[in-house]
Image (cartoon, grey):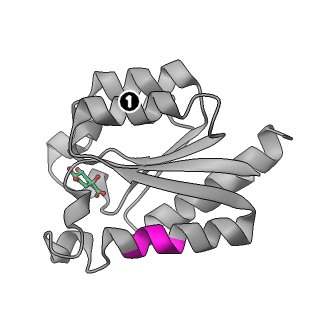
């Protein structure tokens, strides 16, 4: 079965409590349950991980090598700072969809640039928790059409 790793970056473990006007009331657990259920519908095995630490996120991405066929990642604030996470995605060369709950292009200027976007197959942002589900859907379609595995 095609396998997808969902990677959540820093502060996303606080979803539901964290700036709900921006990030919504849905918890990370609820998002993961939705993704697992949506994955079953799409024929994808979904594994979700979260870390507040940049190096741990790099380790998770590296560990996807030869294990997962796709990645959905919300790198949180590391989106705007992390060459290491970008390089990890480029290194494993696993199709990766970048997602954000908020529309980063509508917010402060420092959120407009993503180090991840150039190594991602695409970016989905601005749909709240649904950005993840839409990202998984886009990845499923990409894997079906580009990787007849
Ligand atoms: C975020 C957007 C980032 O700018 C921010 O640092 C986050 C969450 C989002 O999902 O909207 O932590 O990635």
Q: Is residue 32 magenta?
A: yes
Left or right placement of residue 90 versus residue 42 in this view: left
For label 1, the SS is helix
* Residue 37 spot, x, y in % from top left: 60, 74
Residue at screen point 21% across, 31% down: 81
The furthest residue to the bottom: 25
User: Horizontally, is 34 left or right of 3 in the view?
Assistant: left
Quarter of the rendering containing residue 84: top left
Q: Mark 1: few, some, or many residues within 10 Å (few <14, many ≥20)?
A: few
Q: Which residues are magenta?
A: 30-34
Residue at 73%, 45% (x, y): give it.
143
- 129 lies left or right of 42: left
Q: Is residue 113 above or below residue 108?
A: above
Count up the numbered dots.
1
Query: In front: 67, or 144?
Result: 67
Q: Residue 32: x percent and y percent?
A: 45, 67
Which secondary structure is most common in the magenta stretch? helix
Label 1 sits on residue: 59
Please name whichever residue, 46 or 146, is drawn nearer the observer in this view of the structure.
Answer: 46
Residue 110 percent across, percent down from the top left: 16, 41
Q: Quadrant of the C terminus?
A: top right
Q: Ligand 1 within 8 A of label 1's CB?
A: no
Q: Would you say residue 132 is visible in this rendering?
A: yes
At a point 40% along the width and 76% down the height, the residue shown is 30
Q: Is residue 128 visible?
A: no
Residue 34 at x, y percent in the picture: 51, 74
Q: In front here: 24 or 91?
A: 91
Position of 130 relative to 5 (above/below)? below
Q: Residue at x 30, y 74 (%)?
A: 27
Is 58 part of what is drawn in magenta?
Answer: no
Farthest-out residue, right: 148
Is 146 positioned to the left or the right of 53 in the image? Answer: right
């Amino acid at each position: 079965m095609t396998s997808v790793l969902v990677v959540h970056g820093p502060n996303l473990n606080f979803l539901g409590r964290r700036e709900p006007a921006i990030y919504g009331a849905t918890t990370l657990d609820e998002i993961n349950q939705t993704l697992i259920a949506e994955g079953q519908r799409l024929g994808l095995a979904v594994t979700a991980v979260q870390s507040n630490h940049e190096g741990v996120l790099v380790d998770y991405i590296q560990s996807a090598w030869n294990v997962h066929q796709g990645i959905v990642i919300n790198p949180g604030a590391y989106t705007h700072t992390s060459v290491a996470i970008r390089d990890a995605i480029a290194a494993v060369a696993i199709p990766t969809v970048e997602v954000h709950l908020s529309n980063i292009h509508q917010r402060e200027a420092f959120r407009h640039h993503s180090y991840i976007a150039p190594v991602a197959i695409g970016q989905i942002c601005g749909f709240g928790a649904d950005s993840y589900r839409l990202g998984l859907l886009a990845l499923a379609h990409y894997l079906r059409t580009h990787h007849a595995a």
